[in-house]
Amino acid sequence: MSLSNYTIKQVEEMLKKGEISAQELVDLSYKQIEKVDGEIGAFLSLNEEKARGQAKQLDEEKAYKGKLSGIPGAMKDNIATKGMATTCASKMLENFDPLYDATVVEKTGEAEAIMIGKVNLDEFAMGSSTETSAYKKTKNPWNTDYVPGGSSGGSAASVAAGEVMFSIGTDTGGSIRQPAAFCGVVGMKPTYGLVSRHGVVAMAPSLDQAGPITRTVEDNARVLEVIAGYDQRDMTSVKKDVPAYSENLTQDIKGMKIAVPKEFLSDGVDAEVKEAVENALQMFELLGASWETVSLPHIKYSDAAYYAIAYSESASSLARYDGVRFGHRASEFSDVIDMYKRSRSEGFGDEVKRRLLIGTAFLSGDMNEQIFRKAQKVRTLIKRDFQAAFEKFDLIIGPTTATPPFKLGEAIEDPLQLQTSDMLAVPANLAGLPALSLPCGFTESGLPIGLQIIGNHFDEQKIYNAAYAYEQATNHHKKRPVIGGAEV
């Protein structure tokens, strides 16, 4: 039996019928990790003793009352876990053991999910390929010569490789959706404020959002309804009832109006990606929806605005890692200023240091007005473009990424190329909108392509319904990578 062949709902029914046990599910997960993770490199640490103890207790009680009872899952390693290292894939936090669990960890625990371990990411979530991690490079399960995307590359790869049934990632500028697209799985960035950020190590707090990565749309909806909800410990958390997304799924999308921004299918989009998205739009027509090309005129400024805001907020967020309050401390230094310099130089990797230097410059002197504050104004214009579109349309659809996955090492030395890999994803973060990526095809060489569906604030159900209808009408989600796929 392979975890890749079953949905969370199917496993739930099997548990209740006694056809499988929580301990067997955990065994399957760890056996798969042992089998493939040496090549994939998704996990940074395992939670085996605690996970097996939790599974044993669930089986002894045989209640399985939680929405995720016995389901093996993983946490991105920038999410605080009490009694377990939270490194952010950085030497700066190599020995950091939080005193508390993040809210998403608490909520999945209350739902009786079993946390198998912590997965790899770009250092401090800064990157688009999971190559900037201080510990290892994660590889794409569909072809290990290629990147899994980032920064939640470990989250997406662990699901695609059949090591776990869900993983929680974070998305600041596409870091859930882009790796989901590259790994052929489903990733949701919820509305800003729907999922608590309490315990999620901050990169750019006005953009960061945690969300689920799964193999199917229904599984994704199931996990989101568990982790969403108001949390008084997060000042940006929104007081709003959480629907039972998975129970309200429907394939009936007749009459749904879809906007397709021409900017999302510009000359910069790879031909195979464009073709896959156009085929998906034809499928939506067959399902009874209609679509129309529109223009979001300020989208072309998204990248510039995003990087000005994200780098600036990152410089502020990571200022706390000084060797005194948090993080690595240099062993040799001449005075306190030298200690700060050496600790941060030794603790942070090159990509993080590059972003922090740029962000600090953006916040300094005249550049604060010329770049950072101007970027905030552009952000407002982008929000207004989306608001105008949602007055006429239900959803906005386009590619998740402009290109298919790229090879390991191909872009790591070219920051501009890495940045362009997120160019279609960052607008949703700037506007705080929910957005989902799901598989919509494959390249001739067998690499996955992702379709992005963006909704209005708190329209996750509408996104899930459209994604579910499309998924059920196609077979893309049924394909498995050779490494970590169905048993052979």
Image (cartoon, rainbow, N blue to C red):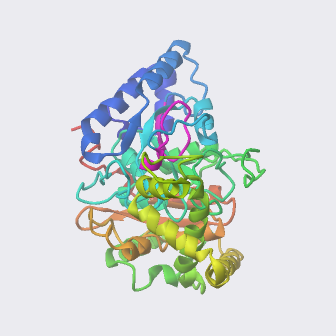
User: Which image quadrant: the N terminus?
Assistant: top left
- State whether residue 402 is above or below residue 336: below
Magenta highlight: main SS: loop
**Picture quadrant where residue 142 is located:** bottom left
Q: Is residue 75 magenta?
A: yes
Judge by depth and name the residue closer to the eye, 394 or 189: 189
Q: Nearer the viewer, residue 195 or 416?
A: 416
Report x, y in % for residue 105: 58, 38
Q: Is residue 465 visible?
A: no
Q: Residue at x 48, y 21 (%)?
A: 55
Q: Is residue 265 magenta?
A: no
- Front-lying residue, 238 or 222: 238
Quarter of the rendering containing residue 414: bottom left
Identify whether 58 is placed above or below 394.
above
Which portion, as a residue range, is magenta? 71-93
Locate residue 293 relative to residue 36 in the image: left or right.
right
Viewport quadrant of the C terminus: top left
**Total marks placed:** 0
Q: Residue at x 61, y 40 (%)?
A: 102
- Position above or below: 335 against 358: above
> Residue sitting at 48 percent across and 74 percent down?
423
Taking the spot 25% from the left edge, 61% from the top edge, the residue there is 446
Query: Residue 292 location, x and y as percent?
Result: 56, 81
The reply to whether residue 336 is in sight is yes
Nearest the eye: 324 or 228: 324
Residue 121 in the image, given as x and y percentages of width and height: 42, 52
Q: Position of residue 10 (x, y in %)?
A: 47, 34
Relative side of 321 to 277, left or right = right
Q: Residue furthest front?
A: 334
